[in-house]
Amino acid sequence: MTIANTSTTTSAHTRAPLGVEILTQERTERPGYDPARLPGDGGPRRHPLHRILARDPGEYLFVGLRGVTAPPDTRPLTLHLAPGDICFYDVRHVPALDLPGPFRATVLLVPGDLVGPAATDVQRITRFPVTRASRLGGLLSPLLSDLARAMAEAQPAVGEMLAWNAVNLLATLTAEHLGAAEPGPAGVRSPVLERILEYVDVHLTDPDLSPEVIARAHHISVRYLHKLFKDEGTTVGRWILRRRLEECRRDLMRHGRGSRTIAAVAARWGFLSATHFSRVFRAAYGMSPREWRDTAGRATTSGRG
């Protein structure tokens, strides 16, 4: 951490895991010669027509998106913020900042691909702050500020967990905010959920795979994990069961009678009981695993003939 002081302003910079950086500025009175500045990539350039104005003292939260591939938004824009508002911006095109004194500005610099807005969505999210008066803003603004302060003081192992939590919260905030502003394409999942689904597929063979294990591996709460799957119209347990049944069905069709037993196939994909496997397989596909294997085997044989 590096700290620089002037007579009126204190600033701090911390590098956290996952490519996250935390910067703070705090001013106890308003000087005429010490303007607040948002950090960006590519030097001290500022977008001359993109301005952020605030009139009341308090704390403001900014999220700078790095690695954005969409063209920078060059349209004129003036945003008016209130204390506690969360404002996204593109670090390649940093807006001019006019904050009152005293103030505290907390800036989280994050890789855009972790937070998740598509290239076409970046301009939308940088033009609409998340207000503290909104339901999501009121919940996440103080939480993100607290996480930023905790990351700046944490040991590496704890800092990584806190960084994952901050990124997951920002991904949720991005998805919810974009959805509230304008419906997105159907079927688009949050990057957090995409990572979780990949994790589930990799660990399907582990009979101990559970919501607790998945949540711990992604540094999120079990409650938040269940919410992600609820938004998909399913549950964690049903998703795991469906994926295991799909892989068992594929194995039975691929290998037929000549290789693994049905019990062996079930055990390979995390089923502890062959009886339970047969029951849920029949419920899902309308036939027993043996009937499926025999039907698939006959179809394969006739296809070769």
Image (cartoon, rainbow, N blue to C red):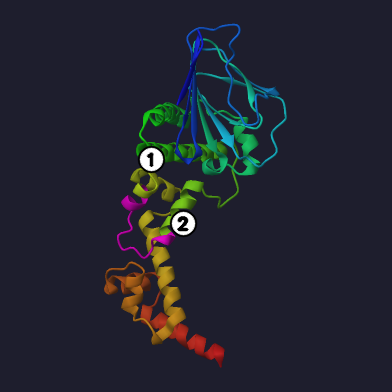
Question: Residue 286: where, in percent of width, then height?
Answer: 40, 75
Gap in angstroms between the C-alphas marked 2 and 1 = 19 Å
Q: Residues at badges 2 and 1 in contact (C-beta under 8 Å)?
A: no
Question: Which dot, 2 or 1, sits closer to the camera?
Answer: 1
Q: Which residue is mark 1?
A: 161
Q: Which residue is mark 2?
A: 198
**Is residue 233 something one can see in this rendering?**
no
- Is disc 1 placed on a helix, strand or loop? helix
Residue 208 vertical placement versus 231 (above, below): below
Residue 101 vertical placement versus 38 (above, below): above
**Left or right of residue 262: residue 183:** right
Q: How many marks?
A: 2
- Is disc 2 placed on a helix, strand or loop? helix
List the single residue furthest toward the bottom.
305
What crowding class fits label 2: few (fewer than 14 Cα within 10 Å), some (14-19), or many (20 or more)?
few
Is 219 or 271 nearer to us in this picture? 219
Identified by mark 2, the residue type is: Glu
Residue 253 among magenta residues: no
Is 164 or 283 nearer to us in this picture? 164
Highlighted magenta segment, given as a residue range? 201-215
Residue at image location 45% in from the left, 30% down from the top? 135
Question: Residue 124: where, in percent of width, then height?
Answer: 63, 35
Question: Residue 14: where, in percent of width, then height?
Answer: 46, 29
